[in-house]
Image (cartoon, rainbow, N blue to C red):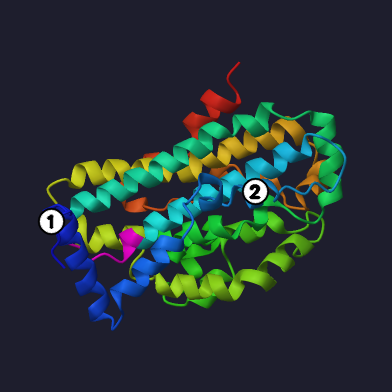
Amino acid sequence: MANSNFDDKIINQLRQLEEKYEAMGQDLSSYLDGLLHADYLTYWDYIHLDTLLSLQTPKTQFPDEKIFIIYHQITELYFKLILNEIEQLAFDDGSDADKYLLRVNRINRYLLHLVDSFDVMIDGMDQKQFLDFRMSLLPASGFQSAQIRMFEISCTDLINLVDEGQRASMDSNNLEQMYDHLYWKRGATELATGKKTLTLKQFEAKYSEQFLKLANKYKLDNIWKKFDTSYKSAPNKDEIISALRKLDQLSNVQWRLAHYKSAVRYLQRDPEVIAATGGTNWQKYLPPRFQRVIFFPALWSEEEKGNWGKNWVEETIFKK
């Protein structure tokens, strides 16, 4: 293969490619022919830009509905990034505490962007437009975001996601029993009858089987279990604990209350307008103090758990 017209680096790369394709029973020359005829990659083709920008299909003529759609699509992409980090973090070999911390910090960075970006929803839409177009979208609701539930399931033991008043009666080894009593289901029940809303029925029909499989997959490999079994004695354990506490706060206090602030902004405080969320009882579902979902309870004092979310509410929701 040697040729005086090529420098040693190119020759070495060709040899490595030859070895790679020979190991797979493939002919390098055929692949090089294909490379000769292939078009150059463009930015718009690589990220499927035209397709991406065509995915906004409003159901009404209100211009601000596009803001609503795009913001939720952006949110789902952020959660996809988060789940990508968790997948790598949970199923590593448990030997690299620095890499574990790196991935937790990446997750926190994504969550921080999500919390900060909620201003788009809080101040970025006309209230009357929102109330008008939102009623055209029933019974759909952001409550039906499967990736948010996947994120929660992969962070902590499922018992920590059970409605707080029922945790003591649960068998922590019975995933099906715990799944039936997850806290978020209470947020999609009818106020008058306590029956499941259509929003919840749709959601469970589509995703329950997938959620249970995921819960089983992460039963021994969620973010908490990984720390508890592999990294709680690591040299950088204090940094890891700080990052995990931040993850808990961002997920279960700041993210929820940013969402709550948006609901207050557009839906006010009247139970009659709960219909505009697809029937979800957001006033009982979103505030952390009503369900006290905490991913890593062992990292918090009893006082901190008792005041879960209180300081953030006082500073952010009720600040004059």
The quadrant of the rendering that contains the C terminus is top right
The quadrant of the rendering that contains the N terminus is bottom left
Question: Which residue shows up at 66% across the image and 47% down it?
Answer: 284
Q: Looking at the image, is mark 2 or mark 1 earlier in the sequence?
A: 1
Region in magenta? 88-95
Question: Which residue shows up at 31% across the image and 42% down it?
Answer: 243
Where disc 2 sits, the SS reads: helix
Q: Amino acid at mark 1?
A: Ser
Label 2 packing within 10 angstroms: few (<14), some (14-19), many (20+): few
Q: Return the residue nearer the eye: 85 or 7.
A: 7
Percent x, y of residue 181? 58, 67
Label 1 packing within 10 angstroms: few (<14), some (14-19), many (20+): few
Q: How many angstroms separate mark 2 from mark 1 (CA)?
A: 45 Å
Q: Residue 233, can we see it?
A: no
* Mark 2 vs mark 1: in front: 1
Percent x, y of residue 82? 44, 52
Q: Return the residue nearer the eye: 94 or 69.
A: 69
- Report if residue 164 lies within the magenta region: no
Residue, disc 1: 4
Q: Amino acid at mark 2?
A: Asp
Vertical placement of 95 versus 305: above or below?
A: below
Vertical placement of 228 versus 65: above or below?
A: below
Q: Residue 106, can we see it?
A: yes
Residue, disc 2: 50
Percent x, y of residue 147? 55, 58
Percent x, y of residue 138? 82, 53
